[in-house]
Image (cartoon, grey):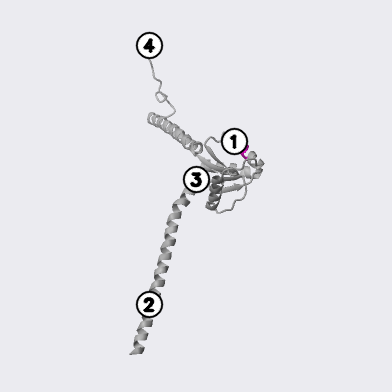
């Protein structure tokens, strides 16, 4: 029968005292675990980059040559970044899409009169060339690493805030109206009292 022996580097060590040797072995295990945890945290930004979804709204016109080039560019981007979602709207033949284009432009506080148009996070790009392409790609990379609002979310925020703004406007109009009524009533009463005093 073969006897198994577990070799312990601390037994028979003449370099370190026994207690110090066992402590050293424990510390080595702790440092190994700390190293693994450190690698996990180092990889965390890359995990986030893979999971963040980025939404881009693309407005184009059928037959527009710049729009056709932009479509090819966006297809390439979608292959590079699987979490990129491109929502496309054709505006020449679909009036409702042009209305949406104009509504989004108001949300982003710009005026649009041409295509292609790109909405991503808080950025708007109109037209297409190499510079616009590099700016769009830069914004996509930014949003992959940091959560960005989608154009749809920005539009929803505006729609939710609009009724309250209208209500505030109506409330202020009602208050001003009542103040005018009270002021006129005061003048009328003051005039009547003055007239009664004169007759006496």
- Mark sitting on residue 92: none
Q: Quadrant of the C terminus?
A: bottom left
Comparing 70 with 12, the one in front is: 70
Q: Is residue 91 above or below residue 189?
A: above
- Residue 92 placement (x, y as % from top left): 60, 44
The residue tagged 4 is: 2
Residues marked 4 and 2 touching at CB (< 8 Å): no
Q: Which residue is mark 3?
A: 152
- Mark 3 secondary-structure assignment: helix
**Disc 1 marks which residue?**
75
Query: In screen coordinates, is 87 left or right of 32?
Result: right
Q: Residue at x 43, y 55 (%)?
A: 163
What whole-number distance in Å separates the C-alpha atoms at marks 3 and 4?
73 Å
List the residue tagged with mark 2.
186
Residue at 62%, 48% (x, y): give it. Answer: 114
> Mark 2 or 1, which is nearer the eye?
2
Whole-number angstrom distance, CA of label 4 to CA of label 1:
67 Å
10 Å crowding of disc 2: few (<14), some (14-19), many (20+): few
Numbered range of the magenta stretch: 70-75
User: Quick one: SS at disc 2?
Assistant: helix
- Which residue is outermost to the bottom? 200
- Label 4 or label 1, whichever lies nearer to me, is 1
Task: Please name which of the two marks, 3 or 2, marks the residue nearer to the observer.
Answer: 2
Q: Nearer the viewer, residue 86 or 12?
A: 86
> Nearer the observer, disc 3 or disc 4?
3
Q: Report x, y in % for residue 53.
A: 50, 39
């Amino acid at each position: 029968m073969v006897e198994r022996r577990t070799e312990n580097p601390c037994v028979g060590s003449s370099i370190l005292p026994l207690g110090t040797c066992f402590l050293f072995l424990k510390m080595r295990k702790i440092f190994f675990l700390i190293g693994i945890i450190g690698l996990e945290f180092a990889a965390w930004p890359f995990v986030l980059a893979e999971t963040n979804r980025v939404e881009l709204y693309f407005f184009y016109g059928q037959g527009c040559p710049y729009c056709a080039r932009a479509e090819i560019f966006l297809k390439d981007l979608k292959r590079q970044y699987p979490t990129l979602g491109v929502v496309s709207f054709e505006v020449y033949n679909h009036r409702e899409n042009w209305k949406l284009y104009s509504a989004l432009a108001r949300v982003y506080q710009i005026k649009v009169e041409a295509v292609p148009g790109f909405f991503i996070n808080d950025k708007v790009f109109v037209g297409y060339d190499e510079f616009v392409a590099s700016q769009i790609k830069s914004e996509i990379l930014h949003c992959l690493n940091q959560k960005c609002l989608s154009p749809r979310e920005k539009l929803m925020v505006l729609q939710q805030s609009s009724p309250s703004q209208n209500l505030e406007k109506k409330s202020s109009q009602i208050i001003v109206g009542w103040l005018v009524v009270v002021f006129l009533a005061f003048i009328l009463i003051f005039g009547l009292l003055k007239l009664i005093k004169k007759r006496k």
